[in-house]
Image: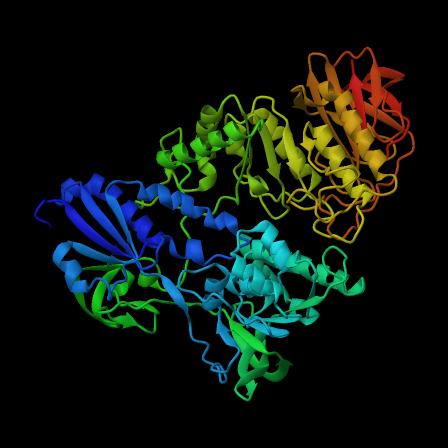
Amino acid sequence: MSETNELRIAVIGAGPAGVYSSDIFLRQLGKLGEELGLGTKARIDLFEKLPVPFGLVRYGVAPDHPSIKFIASALEKTLDNPDIHLYCDVEFGKDVTLDELLERYDAVLFATGAVEDKPLGLPGSDLDGVYGAAKFVEWYDGYPTGAREWPLDAEEVAVIGGGNVAMDVARELMRNADDLKAKTDIPDNVYEGIGQNKAKVLHLFIRRGVAQAKFSVQELREMEKLPGVQLIINEDDFDLDDETIEVAGKDKLTRQMVEELFAVREMAEDMEDDGDVDFEGNPADRKYYVHFNSAPTEILGEDGKVKAIRVERTETGADGKMHRTGEFTDYPVEAVYHAIGYKPAEAPGITYDEKGAHLANANGDGRITTEADGGKVRDRLYATGWAKRGPVGVLQYFNPLNAEWQKYIFAQENKTFEAFAFDGWHGDTIGENGPMRAADGGPLGYDENGSPIHLVKDCYTQFLNAAKAAIAPKYLAFNPVGAQGIENVNVSDVDVLYTEFWPWDKDSDGLAYDSYYSIHKAILNACEQSSGKSLIVAAYVNYRNPKSRFNPAAVRLLDSVVFASGGARIELGNGDNMLSDEYFPADTKKRMKGELPGDVQRLYDFLVAYENLLRDGQRPVSRDVQLDNAPVSADGGENTVWCFAKADDQGEIYHFINLMGTDTGWRDEKQLKKEPAELAPARTRLYTDYPARAVYLASPDGADIAPVLLPFTAGKDEAGRYIEFTQPALAYWNMIFLR
């Protein structure tokens, strides 16, 4: 320890790993320092070779991913700590040596990250026109020591890699400069460079198959919507065997990625069928080929320059193992970019583990060693982040229950309210994220029963209650995507209940949200758990298919179920546009055609007219119901008339949903939903003890949504008391009201 009895720690590198580690160390020291005999105070000095901190968060993210760069704002909050000091433009090994640091500090922590490309290692990789992704990323991100100009004179380009960086590089090479300039803060030299880009054809080569791709769903969606770019795929790549599909389906993120890739395939087919157009139907002047199961083996040259790339066809099993086939294809290209991983930086005086691609440390625990394969532990020297474990992993999530982070984010939101006259704040989530730990290794927090919380979804109630208290009287809404953690949102202080439904997600009983009945149950549960609030449902039919029209049967059935259950549905864009994509506005520009606009109008008019019967908190009741011309189910069974009932002191409400001749899934991805078979007038018997004085029928299916008084009889048999009447017809949805 230093003479002042205050620990002094030097951290080499001020990227996310260096900043996070500094914060964690100070917190842990405050809790455990006295017990360990270290005291509770320390001074941490961060040394950064660049003029500014935050490493890859600032300079390793594509310019059209500004949300990631916003993480830098949160890191700045950590640097506000008076015990953390930042020194930029200081390069380890040049401006300061290891011996100098050890003379002045109790410990040195290396968080040097990675800025170099992993070597490609193919014949021809030294040709003119072969580039590592890292240097290209430095250029388009304005890295202080990066190139100011970049050669973009190749008309045919190859990108090697199956991760997010490869996708970023390919996307920027296919970007329209004006579009990029309008949406990002790229430097002027990058704008001018991309404006002169001659690339007309791009090939993305991915060694493994569709189910083994490592990029995110977000990357795929950004690839789909490049103005002027036609996507081209190989149909054979999507011929997945049953075992591969089963394995992919076990992991939620993999399943979502595979589903999105199949949506890309459909989009590519539509682009070709419509005459080689882009995603908006406009003529495409650039072509983007996506090759799975394609392993580059050699870069071919002429006069020292790239002329082609040789690619071997591969096969990938369900276990992810790749096998070579011996089938080769040469593609003419003039430039090759490789994004196959980063190589963490070396540090003068520290042994480097070439095999693991990180600084040598003892069994991966962060203690620097004398040898790559072990050796002696060196006193007072440590590694963290990529310097410790190699270029793997992602940025840490913020703990929703961290009081300091809450205070910061709520304060920022209130600043927004000061600047703009917004009514409230809508939050979103990517799901439960699996078991998680706080930075100190403990639980994220504790629930109302004192049990530890290890899932983000279990934080929702406490976080949202704190958020509402901080922003009141503004409204608060929150979207537990896929209804994951919806039960925790329902009991919170949110003003608006809202969720996206996805058919692969499951409720608390492990049942998929894939049927009308599953959505019905979720709406009822939300109402009960929230003491009467109505759930807004986002369930996207005709999902992400920009070329097709909406299937009226799918829209009308889903709306009928949601409204009858007591919920609302978000689906309308501007004018007659409909939302078939989770991002608003509906940039697919799909409009309702034919009779559908009128059908939807009547559905919403019906919802408004009978809101008291649909949403006033009536309790569900079980009733025996019979029709003389169709089977009746209580759980939305296929080829049945689904009937469910609610009651209050004013009467009983019966909802009849026609599922005869159609399926019970709501998503209608292929636009194959059949219209229910309309039922002729049906004699209806309701077994109930309610002393009805009148029976009313109302339906949004006809031109007139006004209630109709039905003649009825009351009787009793061995099954009990009943009310009997005739429904004139049943197309989609009839509502019966007993008074």
Q: What is the x, y in percent for residue 300? A: 56, 85
Write the residue at 70% across / 69% down.
Answer: 235
Look at the image and tell me whether residue 215 can be seen: no
**Front one among 441 and 597:** 597
Which quadrant of the rendered structure holds the C terminus?
Answer: top right
Task: Please state if 301 lies on the left or on the right of 37 as rendered.
Answer: right
Q: Residue furthest left?
A: 3
Q: Nearer the viewer, residue 90 or 615?
A: 90
From the viewer's perspective, tell me whether residue 436 is left or right of residue 417: left
- What colour scheme has been applied to the protein in the rendered image? rainbow
* Residue 239 appears left or right of 682: left
Q: Position of residue 552 (x, y in %)?
A: 82, 42
Identified at 79% across, 37% down, the residue is 556
**Residue 441, image x and y in percent?**
31, 46
Residue for point 44% across, 32% down = 410
Is residue 516 shown above or below 324? Answer: above
Q: Position of residue 479 (x, y in %)?
A: 56, 37
Task: Tell me which residue sits at (10%, 45%) in the image.
Answer: 5
* Above or below, 553 relative to 612: below
Nearer the observer, 526 or 17: 17
Q: Is residue 436 left or right of residue 365?
A: right
In the rendered view, tell whether residue 425 sits above or below residue 112: above
Instruction: Please count the marks in the image.
Output: 0
Which quadrant would residue 377 be assigned to in this image?
bottom left
Regarding residue 409, the answer to whether it shows in the image is yes
Nearest to the observer: residue 299 or residue 498: 299
